[in-house]
Every structure is written in C-alpha cells, then in structure tokens.
C-alpha cells in the first residue's frame, strides 16, 4: 500500500470511532423492557432515532461494541442492546424520549464508576455522556460549571491553577455526575462539606424529555432531590458549583505506614482521636494487602488546610503516634494528591466493595475486621475508614436527601482481582465479610457505596427523607424510567 493511501485509510478508521454505525449494520434488536420483558426494537425505529441524533449509536456487531460496553467494575459483564454517545443536550433529550417511547431498560453512564454496575445493563440502552466535557470557571463569581461527562481531573485541572477547588472525590478518573448526585464525599468534606453542599444549580432533562433548571429558586423540589437522591429524576447535563479557596492549589498531607501487628492498637487510637479533632484536619485509617507479595500495611493518612506554620503542631499527635515503618509530612499539589489512589482503583478489574456509616465505635467491629483480614494471592484487599463531622454535620438532615449528617465515620471494605474464575469465590468472601461487620455499623449507606443491597435497604438508608424523595420521583419520573440506581420507587 502506498504511504498516502495508508495515511488516508488510517484517518478514516480513526474518525469512524466517532461516527454512527452505517444503516446497513442496523437490524431489529432483541431488548429488555423496564419491566424485564423481552421486546424487539425495530430497525425502522432505530433508524428514525439515528436520523436526528448527533452522536454515535453502537449495537452488537459494531467493531467497537466490546470495548464500549465495558465499565469500571469488571464484575459487571453486561451486553446492552444499544450504546448511544451523546454530544449535546438535544442528544440527551432524544435518547430519553426514545427510551421512554420504547419502554426500554435505561442505564446512564458518565465516568462508569458505579460499584454496583448501575451504569450498564443487559438488553437495554446505555446513554453515555463521556463526550460532553466542557468546563467553565468564572473567577469573578467564583463558580465552576461542568458538563456531565467530566471527570474529577477535568474539574480540578481547571480550578486548582487559580487557587480554588470544588470538594469532590478521591480518584481522579471518577465521573463528576454520579459522584455529585450521590452526595460526594472526599478529602475536603470536613472543611468544605459534601459536593452537593457546594452545588448551586443543575440543568437536567427529566423523564418527559424536558430540559429544566434546578436550584434553590427554580424547581426547588427537584434541586432538593438531586442533592443525594442519585440519578432517580433525570439526566443532569451540567453542574454549577461554588468554588472554595485552596491557595496555590496546595495542601499539607502526612502518611504513616505501620506493621500490621499494631493494627488493633492503631484502630483504638484512630477512633478515639478522630472523634474530637478540628474540622480543618482529615484523618483516614486503613489497611491493604499487596496482591503479589502478600505484604500487608496499616496506614494513617492525614490532610491539613490552614496556616503552614501551624501544621506541625496541629498534626503532632497523629505523626508521633506508635512505631511507624515510615512517616512523612509534606506540602503537596492537591492535583497530585487526587491521583494517588488512581492505580489502586484501575479500570476493568473485578471489584467487590461495600460501605456503611458508623454512628458510634464498637470495638467488636475491629475484632471482626481483623479476624477475617487475610492474604489471598491475586486479590488486592483494601479497606479504609474516614471521619465525617465538621462541615458535613452543620447541614440539617432534612436539608438534602443525603442521610447520615450526624454519622461519625464511614467504612469501606472489599477487594479486587483479575481472574474471572475467582469471581464467584471472592464475591462470596465479600458477602461473608460484610455479614460479620454489618451488626456493628449503622443501617445506612452512602448511596455511592451500594454493591448488591436490595430496595428495602435503599429505603432504610434514606430514613426520614425517603417519603419526600418518593414525592419528587412521582412528579418527575412516575414510570421509573431511571431505575438503575439506588432506586426510589414511585408510588403512582
């Protein structure tokens, strides 16, 4: 092949990744309805939808289908009937209208980080937002606005160079949308609150295909619902947040690593000390086992925001505790800190992770945790506890749907692996682990930490706010088109 022909063909192949599939590739598609029935999407209806859709439409048989259907948690190996990549608000509206008219099982995907696999489905449609990643930072008004396909890195990279931040999660390739709608916990939450506590407004397309603005002044019931109620009410197309000061985009962080033989002693210290610490300090504790060497570590990770000259004194008790294998306190770019956990949360590994909130510490929790903590070759075991309180608890329980304003800690325990043959065994390991831990935790979960809990547990988690959430659901999504989430079931 001549060089110029090769270049031409390569360019066409590259471009085709973003082009809709050819009409000749479209067939009647077997699919699944909202109620779980088998249905058929006719070729005529699909082509009609495609004719006015700006983005790409992918079905099984397309060369990119196998890659396109993957989500972050490789446990969920599902095959949707259609994957549609939206490039505009109008695309989102058309996708929602098509899904509703076809009564089609509908998943919404931004970063695809749903632990419980709710951003994919078998036989339904995935409405993918990952191409919608525009950002705008208004320094005069101190507001950041981002489209729904943005990741935390997209957001941080635009705000931190100006000395501002939006409090969010701790893994930079997480999607902003799902994180925010679930509440948004992260390393700055004690100082600046949850992500939803910094949310000003959203643009959202509800189940009827209508674009609405939601804020304290416009559709306030809907704005209340999306601040912790997940993706139950529609697809948010853009988010606007208040910016918080973070001078030079820097923080002070410290990490102590300990031999695992000190674990019980450190847990007692952690729960006791963290209960009374000031809100400008974040303290995490946790353990992990390396999946290759079996070496286990206990860590205390701290973060401080404030006067640099006061950091050493403020962190003194933490950094001097016990006999660490290593300890360090450094000033660090927050953007770098946000990427520390990225590799330990890599895409397409198989994850079983669960979380619960903790209202009061019971030493039996540590006993159960340590009794079952062990090394298994090929499985990376990880767990952590983070302190809530501070700015989180300054918001009333009913001001947002996010339940647990008065919880003291949040615990996650789980593992991940690559061997498909081990998935059933390791999933059962995770379930058994949590069966032992759950009696010592609150019957409540940060909704983004759902794994395989049932509908009853979702309702229990929202507590006193669940009834009001049902009212919002009845108004904006009475047919439960958006059911793949920590679902609020409509009662109409």
Image (cartoon, grey):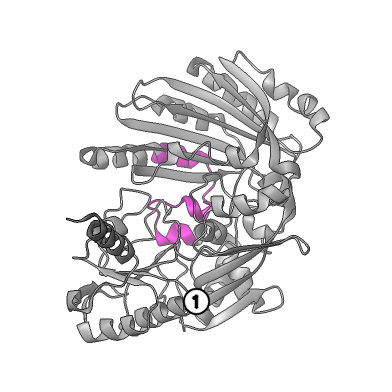
Is residue 172 on the magenta stretch? no
Q: Is residue 42 visible?
A: no
Specify the quadrant that holds the N terminus. Answer: bottom left
Say which residue appears at 24% left-offset and 54% top-offset: 3
Mark 1 surroundings within 10 Å by alpha-carbon count, few (fewer than 14), some (14 through 19), many (20 or more): many
The x, y position of residue 220, in whole percent, is 66, 76
**In the rendered image, the vertical position of residue 454 relative to residue 58, given as above or below:** above
Query: On the rendered image, what quadrant is the C terminus found in?
Result: bottom left
- Between 237 and 484, the one nearer to me in the picture: 237
Which residue does the numbered mark 1 point to in the structure image?
89
Instruction: Please tell me in which quadrant of the rendered image residue 154 appears.
Output: bottom right
Dividing the picture into quadrants, the one containing residue 300 is: top right
Identify which residue, 279 or 4, lies in the foreground: 4
Specify whether 247 is left or right of 156: right
**Residue at image x 58%, y 17%?**
326
Write down the quadrant of residue 380 in the picture.
Answer: top left
Instruction: Please say if 7 is above or below 41.
Output: above
Verify whether residue 440 appears in magenta: yes
Residue 339 placement, left or right of 160: left
User: Could one spot residue 330 in this view of the protein?
Assistant: yes
Q: Position of residue 134 (x, y in %)?
A: 55, 64
Taking the spot 43% from the left edge, 60% from the top edge, the residue there is 456
Q: x and y percent of residue 361 in the render? A: 60, 35
Tell me which segment is drawn in magenta: 434-458
Secondary structure at numbered mark 1: helix
Q: Looking at this view, is 283 or 291 the one in front?
A: 291
């Amino acid at each position: 092949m001549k060089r110029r022909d090769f270049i031409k063909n390569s360019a066409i192949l590259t471009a085709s990744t973003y082009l809709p599939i050819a009409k000749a590739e479209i067939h009647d598609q077997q699919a699944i309805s909202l109620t779980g029935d088998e249905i058929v999407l006719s070729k005529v209806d699909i082509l009609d939808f495609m004719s006015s859709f700006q983005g790409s439409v992918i079905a099984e048989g397309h060369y990119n289908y196998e890659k396109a259907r993957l989500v972050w948690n490789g446990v969920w190996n599902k095959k949707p009937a259609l994957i549609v990549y939206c490039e505009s608000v109008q695309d989102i509206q058309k996708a929602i209208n098509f899904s509703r008219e076809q009564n089609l099982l509908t998943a919404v995907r931004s970063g695809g980080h749903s632990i419980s696999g709710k951003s994919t489905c078998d036989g339904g449609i995935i409405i993918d937002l990952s191409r919608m990643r525009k950002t705008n930072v208004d320094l005069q008004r101190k507001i950041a606005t981002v489209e729904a396909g943005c990741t935390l890195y997209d957001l941080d990279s635009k705000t931190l160079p100006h000395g501002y931040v939006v409090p969010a999660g701790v893994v930079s390739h997480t999607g902003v949308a799902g994180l925010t709608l679930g509440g948004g916990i992260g390393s700055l939450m004690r100082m600046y609150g949850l992500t939803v506590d910094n949310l000003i407004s959203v643009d959202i397309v509800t189940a009827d295909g209508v674009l609405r603005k939601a804020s304290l002044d416009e559709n306030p019931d809907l704005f209340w619902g999306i601040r912790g109620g997940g993706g139950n009410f529609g697809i948010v197309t853009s988010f606007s947040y208040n910016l918080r000061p973070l001078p030079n985009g820097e923080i002070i962080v410290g990490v102590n690593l300990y031999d695992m033989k000190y674990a019980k002693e450190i847990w007692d210290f952690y729960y006791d000390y963290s209960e009374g610490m000031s809100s400008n300090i974040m303290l995490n504790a946790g353990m992990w086992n390396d999946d290759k060497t079996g070496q286990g570590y206990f860590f205390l990770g701290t973060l401080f925001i404030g006067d640099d000259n006061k950091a050493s004194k403020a962190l003194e008790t933490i950094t001097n505790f016990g006999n660490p294998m290593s300890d360090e306190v450094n000033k660090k770019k927050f953007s770098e800190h946000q990427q520390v956990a990225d590799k330990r949360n890599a895409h397409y590994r198989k994850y079983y992770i669960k979380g619960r909130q903790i209202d009061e510490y019971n030493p039996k929790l540590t006993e159960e945790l340590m009794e079952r903590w062990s090394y298994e070759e090929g499985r990376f075991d990880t767990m952590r506890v983070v302190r809530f309180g501070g700015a989180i608890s300054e918001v009333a329980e009913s001001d947002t749907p996010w339940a647990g304003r008065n919880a003291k800690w949040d615990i996650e325990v789980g593992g991940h692996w690559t061997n498909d043959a081990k998935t059933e065994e390791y999933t059962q390991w995770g379930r058994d682990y949590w069966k032992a831990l759950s009696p010592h935790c609150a019957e409540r979960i940060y909704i983004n930490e759902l794994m395989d809990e049932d509908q009853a547990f979702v309702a229990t988690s929202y507590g006193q706010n669940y009834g009001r959430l049902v009212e919002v659901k009845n108004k904006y999504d009475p047919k439960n088109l958006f059911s793949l989430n920590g679902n609020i079931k409509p009662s109409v």
